Image: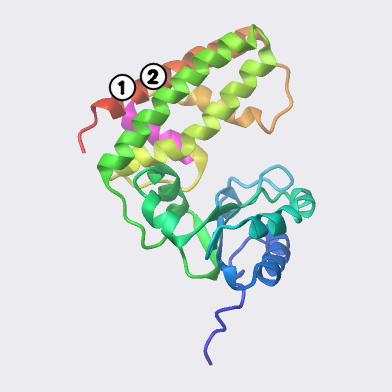
Amino acid sequence: MTEDKNNLKIEGLRADVREAIKSFAEKLKTELGENLLSITVVGSSLTEDFRQGQSDINIVLVLGEQNLNSLKIIASMARSMSKRKLTAPLLMTPGYIERSCDVFGIEFLDFQLTHKTIFGIDPFESLRFTKRDVRLQCERELKATLIRLRQGYISAAGNKKLVRDILIATASGLVPLLRAMLWLKNIERPGTNEAVFTKAAKEFSAGMDRIVTARKWRHEKMRLQESEITAAFESIYTAVEKLADIVDKLEV
């Protein structure tokens, strides 16, 4: 008996996200029809980092063609998606993926590491990347992060909450970057965030403790002293600066 290619392959998804993803996927299949080529779940909902009710569920849709009608169909589902913690899906075409490996290596490497295609053909499994392209993207992203940290700190004008939010965003954004840097050095990439920081701290001799702490602030309601915010900013800025210098000099 052959498997129906139109069936959803939701076995293996964690129980606390399965129904939300199944319901959304069924609607997509019905509404988008033949233009929907694949549905792939990516990110924390596939790992131990997922927190029910707090973490978002991220999905990539591969379409035969990008058109306004498809956008309108998916936009009409926005309210129900929000209630189920489903973020707006990333929309791609096969051609877009094929031509973007040189500019989105960090993101695609992360998708390739942690993903589950529940409908259609896996769009990430066979992708290949050049270390030269990935190294250049890592350097660009880290140096851009330093600019955002400086500008954000100035714009915050001493507002602790704003600085805190900047540090949370920075810490979260570093996870795929650090995985890509480990990949550049042919080092196995951990699936969970804290393990990534631990391994990166060892391999790049960069302080990650404050980054780990700042990332946890996203899910914790606590009053932080100005001294804590200042110390965290200084430590995270120094770590990012060191990582940028390392990747700048990395020979691949």
Q: Amino acid at mark 2?
A: Glu
Relative vertical location of residue 106 with respect to residue 97 in this rendering, above or below: above
Horizontal and vertical percent for residue 227?
A: 61, 7
Residue at the spot x=58%, y=30% of the render? 215
Seen from the viewer's position, the closer of residues 27 and 153 is 27
- Please give the label number shown on residue 75: none
Q: Which residue is mark 1?
A: 245
The C terminus lies in quadrant: top left
Relative to 237, 22 lies left or right: right
Distance in Å between CA atoms under marks 2 and 1? 6 Å
Seen from the viewer's position, the closer of residues 126 and 75 is 75
Q: Which residue is mark 2?
A: 241
Q: Quadrant of residue 127?
A: bottom left
Prevailing SS of the magenta stretch: helix
Answer whether residue 112 is visible to the viewer in this image. yes
Relative vertical location of residue 82 with respect to residue 18 in this rendering, above or below: above
Asked if the stretch drawn in magenta spans residue 71, the answer is: no
Q: Quadrant of residue 26?
A: bottom right
Q: Characterize the local packing of mark 1: few (<14), some (14-19) or many (20 or more) Cα atoms within 10 angstroms.
A: some
Relative vertical location of residue 8 with respect to residue 16 in this rendering, above or below: below
Seen from the viewer's position, the closer of residues 30 and 251 is 30
Which residues fall within the magenta stretch? 195-205
Horizontal and vertical percent for residue 206?
A: 38, 24
Residue at the spot x=72%, y=67% of the render? 27
Q: Is disc 2 in contact with disc 1, using a CB cutoff of under 8 Å?
A: yes
Residue at the spot x=45%, y=45% of the render? 107
Element type where label 1 sits in the image:
helix
Q: Amino acid at mark 1?
A: Asp
